[in-house]
Amino acid sequence: MERCLLRQVREHNGSEVTVWGKVLVVRDHGKVLFIDLADRTGSVQCVLKGDHPQFAEAQKLTPESILMVTGAVQDRSEKNRSDGDNGALEILVSSFSQSAAAQTLPFDRDADINIDTLFDYRPLTLRRSREQAVFRVQMSVAQAFREYLSGEGFMEFQAPAIVGGDAEGGAEVFGVDYFDKRASLATSPQLYKQILVGAFERVFSVGNVFRAEKHSTSRHLNEYTSMDFEMGYITDHTDVQAMLEGCVRHIVRQVADRCKNHLTVLEASLPIVPETPFPSMKLTEAQVLLSEKYGISCEGEKDLAPEHERVLCEHAQKETGSDFIFITHYPTETRPMYTYDDADDPGYTKGFDLLFRGIEISTGGQRIHDYSTLIEKITKKTGIADPETVFSFYLQAFRYGMPPHGGMGMGLERLTAKLCGLQNAKEASMFPRDRNRIDVKLYDE
Amino acid sequence: MERCLLRQVREHNGSEVTVWGKVLVVRDHGKVLFIDLADRTGSVQCVLKGDHPQFAEAQKLTPESILMVTGAVQDRSEKNRSDGDNGALEILVSSFSQSAAAQTLPFDRDADINIDTLFDYRPLTLRRSREQAVFRVQMSVAQAFREYLSGEGFMEFQAPAIVGGDAEGGAEVFGVDYFDKRASLATSPQLYKQILVGAFERVFSVGNVFRAEKHSTSRHLNEYTSMDFEMGYITDHTDVQAMLEGCVRHIVRQVADRCKNHLTVLEASLPIVPETPFPSMKLTEAQVLLSEKYGISCEGEKDLAPEHERVLCEHAQKETGSDFIFITHYPTETRPMYTYDDADDPGYTKGFDLLFRGIEISTGGQRIHDYSTLIEKITKKTGIADPETVFSFYLQAFRYGMPPHGGMGMGLERLTAKLCGLQNAKEASMFPRDRNRIDVKLYDE
């Protein structure tokens, strides 16, 4: 008999169906036994009477066990529950077979659990409704990112993870044994997406990047998913900001449409996206604001501290009704070699960070497109006298005509965490890698 | 003035526009000069008369240079060309400015070039219309793969690249320095997608995988893009075959819809997809066929050689009108530890390869879902006495209830190469990694 998905059960009231799913809970009332069964589309109550030949077998069923059940769909005898779409129905079991028996879960399915338990038992904690909701939201975010950019004429590409050098020049990298040579893991698709602007004008990618940073914080992962785009023929960084803003609006709209139930499970609220452009201010302006309005003295500092980002987000929400705020014009010395300097604001760059709910979720800006300017900047930044000796592959694109361009990168896990109201970006990684963990803990305690 | 995309130029006949693009070619007729300009949406001819104040400057323009051009759209004076949508129009230049000058390309833009030139100058060869077509097709394949599976209730996930062990057990892996520990690069998302079947029932991923195999052939890459899915609640491997078949049909349909012009550029033909299910035969049956019909003696061999795959594809096309053929039931000893054995056919597995245009493009099948069967099989396959010491993380999923399941993996580059009629899978990788190359050659010759 063909499998009936649980969301389709109600179309078969009065008929016999075969359903397949996992046991959520068994309630044994002595003369009658109830099994709540779930598949990817919903759940349903299955009923066995005391005289059923498999009654004793059913009494031994444990949660997470896998069952195939055949029985008649009927109106539910006790209608005091309203959970799910099948709350008014049940299946009167004629027979069932078990494909896998399960041990009892080593944690309470619905209780709060600590972060070590969450990751030690990751294959199992991913079965919790809270974790299911997080990754359904994440899938919608990635899909919406691709949809928006495809619609704007961007070409998708798959960036390589094994690279010869370090794109960001300065970030700590993981080394790889590449046959008898040494290679490293990409910290960003940056150089490749710039190269591709010369070929496809507009490109984007969603892929894994790797940072060998030793710090262990709630905002960092050693392997994460970077959503990147790069676009040619821009006037300046504000074109990139406008594209990112459109993309973020689309992501929030899609999450609102597709993930309502998931946000409810997570007790998370939708971001406030203003009708008007996102608020935007220069770093130095932000520092004056922090000092004058919030008594936080940080003028002259080269970057924002986490606390500053938090206060600026609160400010933006209160004053402009936006959960998003751009901070632009970070100092040249803190930005990578390919960053475009603002001639009208010497020492500062045509770049931005996008802050959301207290944290930087994206970094971007205009890039240098002129070959000799780039050569000069690389030498200044890295100390390499002849950049062609190290960056010849990348530099080809600039020797043979590159349009003015810019782009941005955005961490999928960090954005997902903030959308879902999670405390730690690691909770938005299915299989987080940090200094102490690759699936299992790397060190005994 | 706002940028006008070249595909929109015809909407402005009689008016002034500003366009931005790269120079394809400059034709200097002495008293008049033509510049063919291209952006991502098309191309147009721009005209300067001999008395134009920038005429001398225009004479020095080189292909690949980046120009912003302002001028009036008018009917074309010489209408002897029919290339592109703007063949009947031209722009009479009032002014232009150059954002980047280009050196002359180190190869002929439209000629055949050898594979070393193709990759030595990859940032530039990706600007050729042939390479543009290949990667537009590739983008459509990846998008169609995701579309189809999302529509079938599959959940997308991002598989980790840094892993503690080797999923396939036997494939050669690249080692990674992970802080003061050793890790390796994933050869497949296999164990993760199985774990996720326990949580989400149906999952898919598109991501980079890594094989440290030393052989250098036209079908192998050391880093490639693996398109994978895994599905729960199957009866056997034929459910996986049916899902893959639906997916391949959708991919071919989408490539047909979206990539007609690209296939023309590549002189490639669309695959023949039969109305009926794809032909399918057991390995032993295929070997009898090869022997009896084609005089190729290979009965008793444990796998098909490339030559055998080629002949079987020709056979399928001739006899059944299909460019695709499934070969099932490979021997247990040649398949990974998680492979499901066929009780009705001892020594053979409920698995398949999908062959297309002479080559295996996908491998899949049913997986073991029973904990004790899996433990036994791992020990037999790997020699590890207690698999829990090595695979405890993976095995959690099986201790706590796993549905019967199966899935498949398919290399994006290999499929793209075959769809585009390329000789070498590397040509379908933007930045191919092999033993001798990471962007630049690793060894002097």
Image (cartoon, coloured by chain):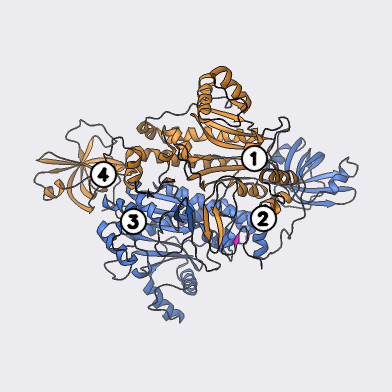
Chain colours: A blue, B orange
Find residue A406 and name its label. Answer: none
Residue A238 drawn at (x, y percent): 35, 60
User: Both on one chain, marks 2 and 3?
Assistant: yes
User: Both on one chain, marks 4 and 1?
Assistant: yes
User: Both on one chain, marks 1 and 2?
Assistant: no
Instruction: Tell me the residue that label 3 is attached to.
Output: A391
Helix, strand or loop at disc 3? helix
Q: At 42% from the left edge and 45% from the top edge, which residue is drawn?
A: B432
Q: Residues within 10 Å of mark 4 (few under 14, many from 20)?
A: few
How far apart are the two marked residues, 1 and 3, measured between alpha carbons? Answer: 44 Å
Q: Nearer the viewer, residue B158 or A160?
A: A160
- Frontmost of labels 2 and 3 is 3
Q: Circle 4 marks a residue in which chain?
A: B
Looking at the rendered structure, the kind of residue marked 3 is Phe
How far apart are the two marked residues, 1 and 2, measured between alpha carbons? Answer: 24 Å
Q: At 36% from the left edge and 53% from the top edge, which residue is drawn?
A: A194
Residue A165 lies in quadrant: bottom left
Instruction: Tell me the residue that label 2 is attached to.
Output: A129
Instruction: Tell me the residue that label 1 is attached to.
Output: B406
Q: Is residue B241 magenta?
A: no
Residue A396 drawn at (x, y percent): 30, 51
Helix, strand or loop at disc 4? loop
How far apart are the two marked residues, 2 and 4, measured between alpha carbons? Answer: 57 Å
Are circles 1 and 2 on residues that touch, CB within 8 Å? no
Instruction: Tell me the residue that label 4 is attached to.
Output: B106
Q: Nearer the viewer, residue B271 or B249?
A: B271
- Relative horizontal placement of residue B184, taking residue A54 as reference (left or right): left
Q: Nearer the viewer, residue A429 or A267?
A: A429
